[in-house]
Image (cartoon, rainbow, N blue to C red):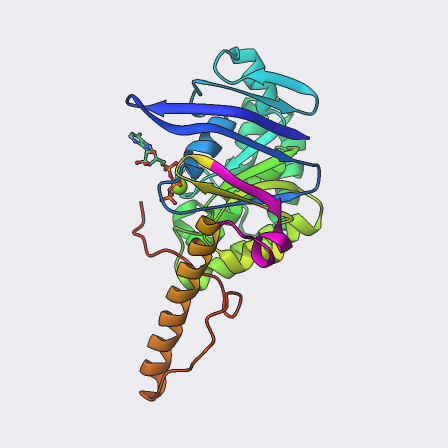
Amino acid sequence: MLELKELHKSIGGTEILHGVNLSIRKGEVLAVLGPSGSGKTTLLRCLNFLEKADSGSVELLGTSLDMHAASRSEIAEYRKHTAFVFQNFNLFANKTALQNVTEGLIVARKTPKAEAEAIGRNALKRVGLADKADAYPSQLSGGQQQRVAIARAIAAQPDVIMLDEPTSALDPELIGEVLNVIRQLAEDGMTMIIVTHEITFARSVATDILFMDDGRALVQTDTKDFFEKNNNKRVRDFLSSLSERMFINENDENHKKNNSHAHSGRASHGKRGGMRKKRGRK
Ligand SMILES: Nc1ncnc2c1ncn2[C@@H]1O[C@H](COP(=O)(O)OP(=O)(O)OP(=O)(O)O)[C@@H](O)[C@H]1O
Ligand SMILES: [Mg+2]
């Protein structure tokens, strides 16, 4: 359904992406994993034409675009089929949840207001926020704001939704509600490309994993194979560094709780609710 070929992108004279390929079929969820700075965000921004690639092509639903030379109208057409969810929600502060969700429909797509509102209310219902239609972003928690942003993506009725670390700006207790909404979308058959550091979530929801390393798509494979059969050293190092960090965190918590001996041999991922890099809000 979507196929990216040989994406190259330089920033400030340095090549950041060195010929990235990926493909995704309808109804699949592709999780993009990889170390910080490996090019995941740049990949997604290029895929959505928020950044102009140096070269590469993307084929969506049978239409191929040159990622460097695509015209405005070609990009506008492509964007009718795609939606993007940002790390920091990107909601309009002076618009209600419903207005945020319907804005694109009314302004860009010229959907009649009543119809847009019906679509918008339905989208808010799907993310569990039917009762918050008239709330402004400042009256919503971070998790609720991100769910509004997801409702906005759903309302556009895209063929594929791309999400860049949708939970990394959230406080830990708010991550679950957003992941649950994304999980439900996946179960409903929405095609998604999601950059995430939530390994446990990726493992349970994604059909495929793309592993980025130093501007290259090192591996794209079935999720089960990625976690169970992968012989790539970089992937193994990445997974074991996460396991070690999780192990350390668990021991920290055990220390705090009972100030007693650490557990042993429980380093496997998937034990707890997902790993997350420590990072500030941007
Ligand atoms: N505007 C910019 N100017 C200069 N370098 C940039 C710019 N944006 C990204 N880069 C560089 O491109 C590389 C890839 O960055 P990118 O943000 O795509 O990584 P990432 O995999 O999303 O990382 P993270 O997991 O921390 O979000 C990094 O080395 C980064 O320093
Ligand atoms: Mg990033």
Q: Nearer the viewer, residue 212 or 64?
A: 212
Residue stretch rendered in magenta on the structure: 217-232
Name the side, left or right, on which 180 lies relative to 280. Answer: right
Number of labels in the image equals 0
Asked whether, in this view, residue 160 is left or right of residue 245, the answer is right
Task: Confirm whether residue 10 shows in the render.
Answer: yes
Vertical position of residue 9 compared to residue 157: above or below:
above
Does any portion of residue 128 appear in the rendered image?
no
Residue 97 in the image, given as x and y percentages of width and height: 50, 43
The percent position of residue 178, horizontal first and vertical second, equals: 52, 54
Q: Is residue 226 magenta?
A: yes
> What is the quadrant of the C terminus in the image?
top left
Residue at the image position 63 percent from the left and 27 percent from the top: 81
Figure quadrant, ligand 1: top left
Left/right of residue 71 with respect to residue 93 in the rendered view: right
Q: Position of residue 103 (x, y in %)?
A: 53, 30
Residue drawn 42% across and 43% down? 87
Q: Is residue 100 left or right of residue 277?
A: right
Measured as percent of width and height from the top left, residue 66 is found at: 55, 15
Quadrant that contains the N terminus: top right
Q: Quadrant of residue 104?
A: top right
- The residue positioned 54% from the left and 37% from the top of the image is 162
Of 225 and 2, which appears nearest the observer?
A: 225
Whether residue 153 is in magenta: the answer is: no
Q: Residue at x 53, y 60 (%)?
A: 200
Q: Is residue 278 above or below residue 49?
A: below
